[in-house]
Image (tube, helix red, strand yellow):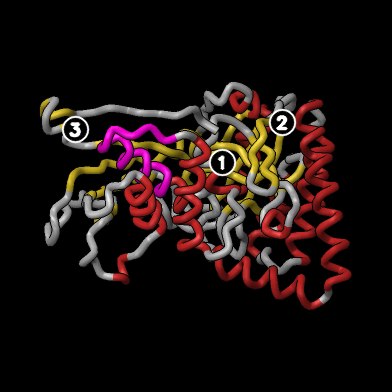
Amino acid sequence: MNSPVRERTEHSSAATGPVRGVGRAHAKAILLGEHTVVHGTPAIAFPLPTLSVRAIARPGTPGAVIDVPEGQFGFVAGNPNAAEHTLSGPRVAVEEALRRWGLTGHIADVVVECDIPLARGLGSSAACAGAAVRAAADLHGRTVDPATLYELVQCGEQVAHGRASGIDASAVLADGPVLFHEGTATALDIGVDAALVIADTGVPGSTQHAVAGVRRTLERDPRSARALLARAGELISGAAADLSAGHAASLGRAMLDFQSLLTELGVSTPHIDTLVATALDAGAYGAKLTGAGLGGCVLALTETGDARTVSAALRRAGAVQTWTVPTRSLRSGAQSLSVSTSEYGANQ
């Protein structure tokens, strides 16, 4: 995770303190472990810093109306008169932060600018909560350590998604790839020199719906569930070793095997299956859904030189946009990411 950050911004004077606070976070993608991580297996995730969130927090007053620019969203945190239906993950996270800081009764107006496509399994809700808490901390001159920031974002994630594993809260705040297990994120070495192509299906997913469906599937046959989770754990452990050792072909096979498990769990769709097959036909080592499924995104691993071909094939097959991430950029956490939008897609 990131080290403690305080990004002090505009100040009116030493007496009155800052006019506003600013906070940032970014998207994430899960390589392997979605859904099974909720049931005790590890998971591998990496940050997507170019898909970012920026939040601005200002001192608020009861009854005031927030001026929210077009394409952004805002909320009032700490106002006891705010309507309950306006409750959101970011608002819950900020209000919990204010409570912990002994600032109950302080009101913050928060405006969030999010570049992450919503409901695509890329961590938009966790990233918005993380950026909002950082903005509130900046506003009040607080330094938030990584463990506390993670806890605060998790408070918001429980509202946004119900039973949240914590991998999103961890990965949207991380500087590089992580192995997440039972609330702990460990940095991963990346030895693979390849590219990851992320394809947006154009279909929103519902994490709560998908998680509930997986739970029902596992509970129907506990013996099969234990075998599936054991297999998932083996695949994730092997994938972590492949990442470190630079075994791209083996990692691609693990992705395909994990996609089969996700299909058994009922979270794949015909459109996702088509995009996975398309990536393989275009030369990818492997491909799978990433995130909750039932929509969202597909992730493909390919040779760096083949990424453009795979990306174009996915767009022709119906992906509304794609992002390409060279794995070498993940080693330092200084990530480059290219974006393509389909002429066939709705999100242009």
Horizontal side of residue 342 vs 93, given as left or right? right
- Residue 15 x %, y %: 11, 29
Answer with mark 3 or mark 1, whichever residue precedes in sequence. 3
Q: Is residue 340 at least partly visible in the picture?
A: no
Answer with mark 2 or mark 3, whichever residue precedes in sequence. 3
Front position in the image: 92 or 124: 92
Pointers 3 and 1 in contact (C-beta within 8 Å): no
Secondary-structure class at tag 3? strand
Q: Main secondary structure of the magenta part?
A: helix
Three-letter residue code for mark 1: Ala
Secondary-structure class at tag 1? helix
Horizontal side of residue 241 vs 123, given as left or right? right
The residue wearing badge 3 is: 18
Answer with mark 2 or mark 1, whichever residue precedes in sequence. 1
Camera-side mark, 3 or 1: 3
The residue wearing badge 2 is: 303
Res. 171 mark: 1
| C-alpha separation, residue under disc 3 versus residue under disc 1 | 29 Å
Please state, as top left, top right, bottom left or bottom right, where the N terminus lies in the image. Answer: top right
Q: Give the residue furthest to the bottom.
A: 220
Three-letter residue code for mark 2: Glu
Span colored in magenta: 128-144
- Residue visible at 33% across and 38% down in the picture: 137
